[in-house]
Amino acid sequence: MSDTSKTATLTIDGETYDLPIYSPTAGPDVIDIRKLYGSAGVFTYDPGFTSTAACDSTITFIDGGKGELLHRGYPIDQLASKSHYLEVCYLLLYGELPSAKELEHFETTITNHTMIHEQMHNFFRGFRRDAHPMATMVGVVGAMSAFYHDSTDISDERQREIASHRLIAKMPTIAAMAYKYSIGQPFVYPRNDLDYAANFLHMCFAVPAEEYVVNPIMARAMDRIFTLHADHEQNASTSTVRLASSSGANPFACIAAGIACLWGPAHGGANQACLEMLKEIGTPDRIPEYIARAKDKDDPFRLMGFGHRVYKNFDPRATVMKQSADEILDMLGVEDNPVLATAKELERAALADPYFAEKKLFPNVDFYSGIILEAMGFPTSMFTPIFALSRTVGWISQWKEQLADPQMKIGRPRQLYQGPTERDYVDIEKR
Ligand code: CMC
């Protein structure tokens, strides 16, 4: 944050207040209102944080107008094509791309933490079989603080480090176990000879009765999905993690809070809704009907996988997802996938329509991801758990950044109170 020597002047009832303006390395300037209440006795009002920066960060930057997503300065399309998930994890956590030696050491560390405490299996068995895997994940990740006491002291930098590694390493194991439990199959232990994505596929799809060989193209596509979801600056679940952490809560409790927030359909659940919509449309000839519905103000229907609060251009993650969808379906020998054909024609028709152009509505990351995950064999209930495991590194990186920030304060928003003013209690017989 650098002082621009610019100030904003606010006038209230004839009194003027000068507010400092800071310039970021990229993105719009910010007006510092921290002293506003003390000097002017007013709050600012911004439900949904549409214009409010709640923290300093050096991790991820999005330029919604340009359709740009950078992690530590590196564009997401370059990371998705040239790097891989664990290298991106290192970049997000430590700020720089690792040397070959640093990467090897990091991969070994993560690999050594993939198993969960054996007694945690009992937690899974306590859930109903038909529990949603996200419900199971919220509970089990929260329960990690009851098992890993030696990494809950947030004032100890080494403990913070170990908690970070444990969460990144164990989340695929927990997500896969939640899935196996929901379909009544035995848990499959992690295999440390496999890479991160291949190990996850193995834990999800192997059974003890026969050998399961992970297809390398599937593993690459899985790794790409993890990479594309790794971080997305101050979104709802990340802000939830930061707010939970601001009270000094332990890392496992904070990440469980993030998982709970991600579960909502406006956040992590949109890819499931998009796939369901594409199936409902069924064939390209029905697209005009659905486009007309999306444009009709009296119809609540929206094109799922279209539009974004921040991106007013192509979501760069959607472009990579589309390529992956083609590759995966080619690899599986699916020549005429009706859902993919419908998706492509819907994208073409919407982009050619002035309504979507004027409102700057473009396909987002969720438009193609459900098609890929379904082709890989995942049920829709696993789409959000996969998002959660991918985003864990983003949550953890932002959590670590916040704890190291000397300006960190407990998060405590203000309110515009609209309720009754003080009044006397009325005894029950007089009401
Ligand atoms: N289909 C049709 N019209 C739309 C759509 C859509 N998908 N999205 C926005 N609009 C219209 C909306 O009706 C409004 O029109 P008007 O100005 O005439 O009232 C205008 O565009 C602005 O919409 P908004 O709801 O004010 O915009 P927002 O920034 O608050 O909402 C959004 C962003 C993502 C919630 C919204 O675009 C949407 O509901 N999209 C569909 C759901 C979806 O795909 N969500 C996944 C987001 S990406 C996942 C992630 O990064 O976490």
Image (spheres, helix red, strand yellow):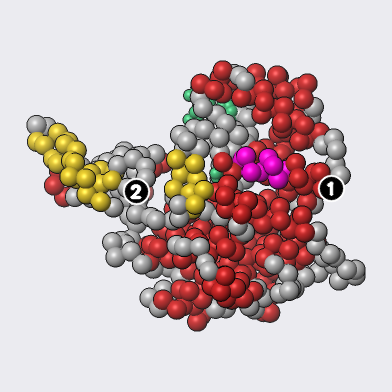
Q: x%, y% of residue 339?
A: 77, 35
Q: x%, y% of residue 26?
A: 37, 45
The amino acid beneath tag 2 is Thr
Visible in this render: residue 388? no
Relative to 104, does residue 271 appear above or below in the rendering?
A: above
Q: 271 or 220: nearer the eye?
A: 220
Q: Is residue 378 left or right of residue 116?
A: right
Residue at 80% across / 59% down in the picture? 215
Work out how far the residue at label 1 is from the one at label 2, CA to CA, in angstroms: 44 Å
Residue at 53% across / 69% down in the picture? 99
Residue under pointer 1: 332
Q: x%, y% of residue 204?
A: 76, 62
Residue 337: quadrant of the picture: top right
Element under disc 2:
loop
Q: Is residue 320 magenta?
A: yes
Label 2 crowd bin: few (<14), some (14–19), many (20+), radius 10 Å:
few
Residue under pointer 2: 25
Relative to 227, does residue 366 appear above or below in the rendering?
A: above
- In the picture as drawn, the residue positioned furthest to the front comes out as 100
The amino acid beneath tag 1 is Leu
Label 1 crowd bin: few (<14), some (14–19), many (20+), radius 10 Å:
few
Image depth: mark 1 or mark 2 in front:
2
Mark 1 C-beta closer than 8 Å to ligand 1: no
Residues in magenta, as a range: 318-325
